[in-house]
Amino acid sequence: MAEEEKKRGGKTYHITQRQEDGMWQVKLGGGQKALKRFRTQKEAIDYAEKVSGNQEGSIRVHRKDGKIRKK
C-alpha cells in the first residue's frame, strides 16, 4: 500500500491507456495488473467511480502521455 493511501485510509485507482492496444484500464495504486479494461476512457472512469465509492477510495485519471489529468 502506498504511503499516500495509508494516510487517507482509502485505495487509489488509476485510469491509464495501454500502449499495446489503446484500451483504457483501471489499476489499483501499486498494482501490476489491470482490474478491468475498457474500450473508452468514460467506461473506465464510470467503473473506477463505482468501485472507489464502495471502498472510500480516490481516482487518478491519466492522459495518454501518462501524466495525471484529473484527481
Image (tube, rainbow, N blue to C red):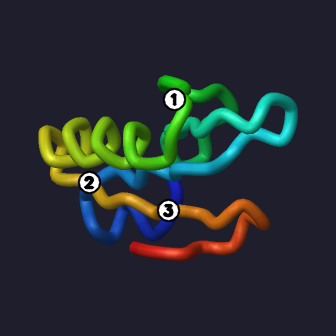
Q: Nearer the viewer, residue 25 or 55?
A: 25
**Residue at screen point 38% across, 38% down:** 43
**Residue at screen point 64% across, 66% down:** 63
**In this rendering, the label closer to the viewer, 3 or 2:** 3
Label 3, label 2: how many angstroms apart (C-alpha)? 13 Å
Label 1, label 3: how many angstroms apart (C-alpha)? 14 Å
43 versus 35 height, above or below: below
Q: Nearer the viewer, residue 60 or 65?
A: 65
Whether the residues at callouts 3 and 2 have beta carbons within 8 Å, the answer is no
Q: Nearer the viewer, residue 67 or 40?
A: 40
Q: Is residue 58 left or right of residue 68?
A: left
Amino acid at pointer 2: Gly
The image quadrant of residue 5 is bottom left
Instruction: Classify mark 2: residues with Cα within 10 Å, few (<14), some (14-19) or many (20+).
Output: some
Amino acid at pointer 3: Val
Give residue 17's position: percent from left, percent from top: 68, 46
Please name the residue that numbered disc 2 is placed on: 57
Q: Residue 22: which numbered mark, if any?
A: none
Please name the residue that numbered disc 1 is placed on: 38
**Residue at screen point 25% across, 48% down:** 49
**In this rendering, the label closer to the viewer, 2 or 1:** 1
54 versus 45 height, above or below: above
Please name the residue that numbered disc 3 is placed on: 61
Give residue 25's position: percent from left, percent from top: 57, 36
Label 2, label 1: how many angstroms apart (C-alpha)? 20 Å
